[in-house]
Amino acid sequence: MKTRRRQYVSRPSSTSTTISTDLITEILLRLPVKSIARCRCVSKLWNSTLRDPLFTELFLTMSSARPRLLFSLVEDRELCFFSAPQGESSSTVAADYHLQFTLDDSYKVCGHVRGLVCLADQETAHVICKPSTGQLFPLPKVKTKKTFSVYSFLGFDPTDEEFKVLNITSGVQHRVLTLGTQTLEWRMIECGIGRHYPNRNSDGICINGGVYYIARFHEPVVAIVCFNVRLEKYRVINEAEDMHLLGSSTVVNYKGKLGVLTKESRRFELWVLEDAETHQWSKNVYVLPQSLWENVAGEDELYIVGVVGGTDEVVLWPEDVCDPLYVYYYNMERNTLRRVEIKGMDAVSDHTAYMTLDYVEDVKLMNYV
């Protein structure tokens, strides 16, 4: 094999210089994900550098500081992913295309943590996907009788650095699958808090090793449930006395704490769990002026997606997604509403769209999940 010579530009002093490995790493850390994939083909050195655990962890850390909006769009069995900058002050942002694939059934995103996305169909099949690397791994099917109530969540334990998928069927069968092992299998676990059904209108959220979701126990009892990912234990979070969970209530990450946000027309009610041990909550109510709402949102019916960290803006999403595609940001402190257009998704504007917040790009390649 011929060796290609490197040519360096000589300085006036006639001293030749090379770019240090550390500097190359710093440059690579600032490249977009697609460029990282191409750079793996430059040389064995670059490929080794980009696969090095130190580099991938540094890239993940930097990506965590600039989370993105993640869009999954479905038409029939075709599923594709886009992501766009989150919380940008500009009125227009461009979406990046990640990947598209065909599945045997219609899937929906049931959780994403640290770059991993968990997909689930309406019955017993799950798929783990990493949009930033284009990888897709099917999980073993849940062995259970056909049921109409299947719920799944993806959680991450920061202590042992483990990803786990939680599956609840018929409100009584609880299973956990731990990712990162060569032999993947579902394990039955005890619930301990009674039969309950997670609310389909409100997604769960993983905060500091706990998966939180709103669930119905028996009519008309509705409560917040926390699943400890590391201990694989459930507990119910007691509500405040005048706190009422509605169908529009959404669990959110508010400054690293569990928050429950409810929207009724232009009125937003935010509860924040200040102390998880004593179940102490704080409450804030915000009402957006009607004129501002009409000027920005018009007649669009918007629902809550979550809260952006740092700016504490509520992200809103229209019930009917169409072209042009807009995302709305409501700043609770300033009581302002703004609209951001997402460019680059025209080709899939007729697809059924689903959006989540705080997506982090991770360039670590998965050998298995």
Image: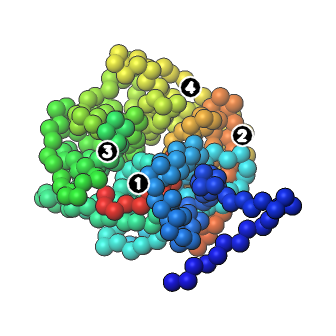
In the image, is 187 to the left or to the right of 197?
left
Q: Amino acid at mark 3?
A: Glu
Question: Which residue matches tag 2?
Answer: 292
In the image, is 187 to the left or to the right of 152?
left
Answer whether residue 136 is visible to the viewer in this image: yes
Q: Secondary structure at mark 2?
A: helix
In the rendering, at what x and y percent does residue 148 appear? 22, 56
Q: Earlier in the sequence, mark 4 or mark 3?
A: 3
In the rendering, at what x and y percent does residue 179 appear? 28, 52
Question: Which residue matches tag 1?
Answer: 116
* Residue lying furthest bottom: 1
**Mark 3 crowdedness (10 Å alpha carbons): few <14, some 14-19, many ≥20:** some
Q: Earlier in the sequence, mark 1 or mark 3?
A: 1
In the rendering, at what x and y percent does residue 68 appear? 56, 51
Q: How much space separates mark 1 and mark 3, taking CA atoms?
A: 12 Å
Q: Secondary structure at mark 4?
A: strand
| 97, above or below 269, in the image | below
Q: Quadrant of the C terminus?
A: bottom left
Q: Earlier in the sequence, mark 2 or mark 1?
A: 1
| 161, above or below 109, in the image | above
**Mark 2 crowdedness (10 Å alpha carbons): few <14, some 14-19, many ≥20:** some
